[in-house]
Structure formats: C-alpha cells, structure tokens
Amino acid sequence: MTFGEHLEELRSSLVKAIMWLGVGLCVGLFFANDVIRFIQAPLQGAIQQFNADRDLTSLGYSDLDDPEIQPLREFLMRNALVWETIYEIPEELQTLAPDAIESNLDATDTPDVPAVTVKPYAMKELLQQLPDPTALQPKIQLRESKTSVSSLKIEEPFMIWVKAGLIVGAVLASPMILYHLWSFVASGLHAHERRYVYLYMPISVILFSSGVVLAFFLVLHYVLTFLLAFNGSMDVAVEPRLTYYVNFVLMLPLGFGIAFQLPLVMLFLQRIGLFETEAYIQSWKVAVLVIFVMSMLLTPADVTSMVALAVPLMFLYFLGILMCKFIPRGRGLGSAAYDPA
C-alpha cells in the first residue's frame, strides 16, 4: 500500500469508529440520568455519615464506635437527619394573622431562602410581646437534610448529562471502536506481533477494570470521608458543585485504571531491552518513591487517595517483576527479530 492508501485506510477506520461512538452516545443518553444518580450516591452517603458523626460529637459522644450509640448513628444516617436547636415561641403569643405570612417565590431557586416568611411589621409586633429572651427554653429537634450537588449555571446540568451519556456510549461502543482501530493497526503487524496483542490486551483490560472498580467502590468512600472531615475541622460548609464532583469522580477511577498498567509497562520495557529483571529488583526502593510521586500526580489533592493508589501499585510492581522473570521470551518486533538476550 502507498502512503496515500494508508491515509485513506486510516480515515475509513476513524470514520467508522466515530460512527459507532455516535451510536453509543444515542444509547448512553437514555442511561445518563441513572449514571449521574449512581455516582452521586457515594457523596450523599459520605455527607450523611459526616453529619451524623458531627452531631453526635457535639452532643458529647466521644467514642463513635461505641456499640450503644450505633443504632442512633445508623438511624441518623439512614434518614439523613441532623440535630438543630430551636427556641419555641410560647403558645399564648402565637397570634399572627393569616395575612402576616407571605410566600417567597425565589425560594425554589435558592435553598437557603425560606419558602415562607413573616411580614416585617408582624414580626416587629411579635418580638415586642416576647418575654426576656433568656427565659425561652431551648429544644432539640431532628431535621431531614439531604444535601446533594448543586449547579451555578443554567446549562451545567445539561452539559453534565451529555458528558455522562458520552462516557456511557464510549464504554458501550468500545468493542467496535477498538475493532476498527485494531483492523488498521493489525494490517501492519506480523503474525507473531499480533499474538502479543492478543495475549496482553486482555491482561491490560483486566488491570484497568480492577483499578476502576477499586477506586469507585472502595477508595472513593474513604476519600470523601477524609475530605469532609478535613473541611469540618476547619468549620467550612460543604456545598458540592455538580461539575467539580463529576470530574472528581471520573478522574479518580481513570487515574487508578491507568496506574494499574504498571506490570505491563515493566514487561514491555524489559522485553525491548531498556531494563532487565535484576535492575527492577535492585531499584525497588527508588521505585517505591516514584510510585508515591506518581500517585500524588494521578489522584486528587488528598493523602487518602494517594496512599490508596500507592499501596496497590507497590504490589503490582512486584507482580511486574514476577511477570518479567517467569513469562517466557518470544520473538520481538520486526520480521525476524528476537528479544534481546
């Protein structure tokens, strides 16, 4: 094939891949709302746990692992309840006329604004009738507080919906997308080189999927818990924004999935002769340092996610050494090439 024919073949493969991505996007948009709700669930659970622990601590419970308070803690978390202190107006002063209450039309757009308010002149008369404020008896009540993500731009939820649909569509259409891209690449490879891809591609997919599953179903909960507790220690109110949270949830599993390719990268470098197995073994201390630095760069800015990625990577590093040592060498790249001895 001439150079122009190669370009035409590449163009054809890319067009077919993009068409499949469009088909996947159309299907993914039907599931986009469910995906957004699904990725919000860890955040809502972490916020409910944080609120329960904060309220129990403020009420004097120092040991949150005490079995005696676990039923109360689970009750608060399950029903998304928070404690609040109120000072109730005496019953004999509850003389407001019906026209003293007015509704606030902006309350639907601003959660912090009450839905109904008392007119200023009516509130003034009520306050003048109050006894000494120090005589009012405080009461504690439970209030439902289902804190969720918010948006500051009118188009933000729509863009997140499209992004979620695109991600779902890319995952659903990935077999056909990879098939068309692979059909272009495979035509330029020898038979023994294609066998390398058939062997290592499933391993790469398994490692990537393992990193994504570990990040979303295990690490994400501890990362959110750590960040909420840190914000609470600084008395900072948390109002998660939709765009930032979705990007955070997407970047964390993606970073884990890419980092979990470490054994294959080590095997590739050993097969092309840049590193030998003995060099991996002798440099393990330096490798641990590099792993922690890479974990810091591939994860959000918190210690929990960095450690949660670095620890599995250390095990994967030694797995890479075992793969380099025990997977037999075969023919290398080129028509008659062999791996370096």
Image: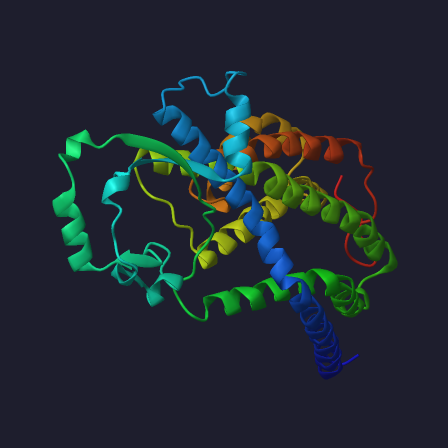
Q: Is residue 175 above or below residue 26?
A: above
Q: Quick one: quadrant of the C terminus?
A: top right
Q: Nearer the viewer, residue 65 or 107?
A: 107
Q: Percent from the top left, x then y, of residue 10?
A: 72, 76
24 vs 220, left or right, is right
Q: Percent from the top left, x then y, of residue 288?
A: 53, 30
Q: Nearer the viewer, residue 321 or 298?
A: 298
Q: Is residue 20 above or below residue 314?
A: below
The reply to whether residue 136 is visible in this rendering is yes
**What residue lies at 42% left-to-right and 55% top-to-bottom?**
241
**What residue lies at 47% left-to-right and 21% top-to-bottom?**
64
Q: Percent from the top left, x then y, of residue 29?
A: 65, 68
331 vs 144, left or right, is right
Q: Nearer the viewer, residue 179 or 69?
A: 69
Q: Quick one: quadrant of the N terminus?
A: bottom right
**What residue lies at 69% left-to-right and 35% top-to-bottom?**
320
Q: Is residue 256 above or below residue 23?
A: above
**What residue lies at 67% left-to-right and 62% top-to-bottom?**
31
* Figure coloring: rainbow
Q: How many marks?
A: 0
Q: Nearer the viewer, residue 28 or 260?
A: 28
Residue 336 position by quadrant: bottom right
Residue 117 position by quadrant: bottom left
9 vs 92, left or right, is right
